[in-house]
Image: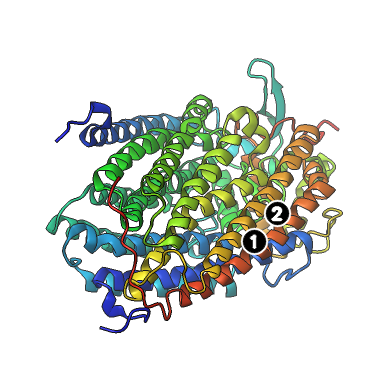
Amino acid sequence: MTALGTIDSANLNGGQKLAVKYFSVALILFGAQVVFGLLAGLQYLIPDFLYEVLDFSINRMVHINAMVVWMLFGFIGSVYWLLEDESGIPIVGLKLGNIVFWIFTLAVAAVVAVYLLVQIGPGEHSTLWLITEGREYIEAPRWADIGIVVCLLVFFFNVAATFAKGKWTGIGGVLTLDLIALFGIYMAGMFYTTNISVDQYWWWWVIHLWVEATWEVLVGGLMAYGLMTVLGARRKIVETWLYIEVALMFGSGILGLGHHYFWIGTPEYWLSIGGFFSALEPVPLVAMVVHAVFDSGVHKMRSSNHPAMGWLIAHAFGNFFGAGVWGFMHTLPQINLYTHGTQWSASHGHLAFFGAYATINIAFFYIAVQKWRGNVWMSGGLIGGWKWKWSMVLLNLGMVGMTMGLLVAGYEQSQIERAIEGSSWAGYFAAQSHPWFQQGMFWRMVFGGMFAAGYALLVLDLLTIGKRETRPAQRPSADG
Amino acid sequence: MTTDPWWASETFWRKTAIWVTAGSFVVLVFLTFDSMSQITAGTRRVPAYSAINHRIEYRFDEQRHVQTPVIGAEEPLFGKKLTEQEAEALVEKGKLTIQAKNCMSCHTLLGNGAYYAPDLTKAWLDPFWGSREVREELMVAFIKDPSDKLHNGLGRRMPRLGVTDEEAHAIVAFLKWMSTIDTNGFPYNFKPLDQEG
């Protein structure tokens, strides 16, 4: 046994050793997301920047694909992290899980290399199979789609078989069922059709039902584990909350899918169904905030891992504001008619993905690094504790600033391009060249820089936090 | 040991979660079947691909209070009337090219995609093209090499994407067909190109 404060994989169980590999790749891809986001953002201000070298379309594609994959890697890592703790036994088929990690990572690298070097292809099916599928968020070529499903199946096998052999917990049951949905729904996006309405109908099954349903439930499970680990919350309480959240999340989110079916050719009844159910979507997010804040209060904020606790709270609020409030603001069809396809969506997308998913992954990075260094002290009075605090401030403030810049641009667009100019191309460019839009984009860039600084500090902190620390972790208090 | 009231019991919420999820999913599956039957190509909401043989208009519907596409008199694309199969093959080529060139990473189609370039839902009807007579050829020429064409006052330009002549014609066919889809009034308040002159 090495000394406290030294990184040593002997401190981790089998699943956790695999988890830190997933976390490492996730953190690198997070960096790629930031870099390509900065490039794409800059192209709004300097249109000829990298013209016909790395066009906006490529930068934007890598920006959002890196995001999807790093979040997915973070989730997979987090589930591997808690799997042995929850089930009480070593992971079944861990070797296969390890092999799949390397295949998955190499496949991601290959896809990104093709995105950057080949970029586009002729209008044939072979392009869709080998280069890009050209559908937002799921641009990955078909061969990679199949690979992703196979990898998720192995991941599912590890999880289901381990819980089945060990013991089932509430968190385990929810996660296992949720993973079936995770790979099942992905397959809805794996076919070609000429009919753009049918195309987008199924495309939303993947995008919405992943992001606004299965991912939300997955992070609900992670949050439950996080609160037990960091705060020492009681299982019965977090699991009851988890079931409430699942009921509210799926109850509103599954039919909330309808808010994407307002304008794509689908029947008019979706205006009512989508409007009604998506208006309910913030409700489970309120429940999560209440739950997290109440539990923290009960435990008098005495946590075994302050950075992780901070990010769990950031998750609760970020999810509520980003997904809940920002989503609700433009979800009713009466307003969405003007905001659909403007920077409103970008504003919502930034705050929601960060608030709901980046935050909880970062919390798990901190949970992991604490144990990796031998379950070292990470509560008050940390050596170099300014780093996690400042990176948290920079990342959150940077994100809120970007969100606001994009929101101003979005307001201006829906007013000038849509309401006044009548959605023509001339109207589009009238809005794009308006000073309010340009200012919004300028400030987005400034806060993007702040966010990037926060990211750099986060990486530095994750590499150094707990180093030379000699105190063992503070035990979370028992339930009040 | 104290007994929890029913509303705080784990079992109650577990059962609720399962029933609510299953119930919502069943409703979604049912609605999906119904939606599919209404958006198959060749229906009122999503017309057949051979609609590209006709003039497409976008008129205000007094009853629904939104603009809807209207398929008008015969006006074949590129002056050549196509059979249903030929039209479908051409539109398919256009859609494949739109995916292969990653158009949605800058543009939106039916409002979905990226926001760096204009929405293409009504590209066929946009006043940008000036007049009905020159529209088709201007569109083909623009798609093949946009780099030296008029765009906007911003300096934002579409890159050359290596689109062949055949692919460019097919993209125009796809865009014309897409403009026939009934999108419940999106984009709102759109003023189409004057096609009478």
Residue at the image point whose x is 54% and y is 40% from the top = B84
Q: Position of residue A470 (x, y in %)?
A: 37, 78
* Front residue (pair A296, B126): A296
Q: Are marks 2 and 1 in contact (CB under 8 Å)?
A: yes
* Label 1 crowd (10 A; few <14 / some 14-19 / many >=20): many
What is the spatial separation of the Cα atoms under label 2 and label 1, in whole angstroms?
8 Å
> For numbered disc 2, what is the local secondary structure?
loop
The image shows residue A169, relative to residue A243, as above or below, that is: below
Q: What colour scheme was applied to this rendering of the protein? A: rainbow
Residues at discs 2 and 1 both on one chain: no
Residue behind mark 2: B116
Name the amino acid, label 2: Tyr
Q: Position of residue A6 (x, y in %)?
A: 37, 81
Protein chain holding label 2: B
Name the amino acid, label 1: Ser
Quick check: A313 left or right of A134? left
Residue at the image point whose x is 43% and y is 44% from the top = A293
- Tell me the quarter of the image containing the C terminus of chain A: top left
> Quadrant of residue A43 in the image?
bottom right
The image shows residue A219, relative to residue B41, as above or below, that is: below
Residue behind mark 1: A57
Protein chain holding label 1: A
